[in-house]
Amino acid sequence: MSGIKRPTEKHLMVCTGRAFPELAQEIAELLGVDLVPTRSLTYANSEIYVRFEESVRGADAFVIQSHPAPVNEWLMEQLIMVDALKRASAKRITVISPFYPYGRQDKKHAGREPISARLIADLYKTAGANRLMSIDLHAAQIQGFFDGPVDHLLALPVLHEYVASKYDVSEMTVVSPDAGRVRLADMWSDRLGSPLAIIHKRRDPNRANEVAVGEVVGDVTGRMCLLVDDMIDTAGTICQAAEALVAHGAKGVIAAATHPILSGPAVQRLNEAPFSEVIVTNTLPLSDAVNIPKLTVLSMAPLIAQAIRAVFEDGSVASLFDGTN
């Protein structure tokens, strides 16, 4: 019996939203594939329309979307893309959100609050996602919010390689800007073989809504200090920490963070702070208005491409981070 022959081997397809197509293009080129041609529109009333302009039936589809401001618009676009893939019979759909939206709302701090990070995971699942991939989640517990496999990628190997190649790590102290980032700083310390210090912040009871940077716990005098964090938003905490380190005798201060949100006064604060260099990755796009001469942006595209290839070939994503605690 003759008929139409269809390929039996699965095929990899990479789709992108409009928030940061340059990152997706770089990833696709490293994988040796073309981005799926996509028609995306925003109507006058702000509703979003998406249509893939080639068949995705039976595909192992990876949907890449960054989430800069306006976060809700780009999140909705990604959800609509996932729904379109599901209805077009894609075999497996992996959502790639380099910067997980609402990741800082991972727990209730008071009554009648949402856990928005869990809601985002539920939305991805309801839309049709089978798998989730993200980089440096603000809280590791978010991995448990999604009902399916989660690939939690780490920017540490990329950032570490750059720092170790440029600076003398024997003269370096790794610094956590607050108590919440001590685990991250400890991972950096293990990687570099450098000592660890912590900025201990105290609130002044006489000054409401202001955080006073208190003591530096650890030896920073005469040393190059590396401040590490998962993100830089308004840059208040990390810039206060840099000033405290200089006041305590640090020879110099550099910063390394994965996600450059850079909201509000962040650019001005970073330019005025005593940093020798600020190192970030391209999990989020930087607008043309961001002018920070001492800013270095490292690409996460090679690591994401390796993770996509591992998932597609049913290999181990964890093996990409062997040696990373």
Image (cartoon, rainbow, N blue to C red):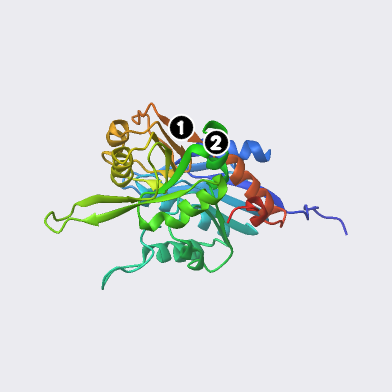
| In the image, farthest residue toward the bottom | 111
Q: Residue at x 14, y 59 (%)?
A: 205
- Report the front residue among 260 and 124: 260
Q: Residue 291 at x, y = what percent? A: 35, 28
Does residue 235 sit above or below 100 in this rendering? above
Left or right position of 75 against 24: left
Give residue 86's quadrant in the image: bottom right
Give residue 253's quadrant in the image: top left
Residue 296's disc number: 1
Label 2 CA crowd tier, 10 Å (few <14, some 14–19, many 20+): few
The local secondary structure at tag 1 comes to: strand
Give residue 112's quadrant in the image: bottom left
Residue 162's disc number: 2
- Report the front residue among 209 and 4: 209
* Marks 2 and 1 in Cβ contact (< 8 Å): yes
- Report the front residue among 128 and 281: 281
For badge 2, the amino acid type reads: Tyr
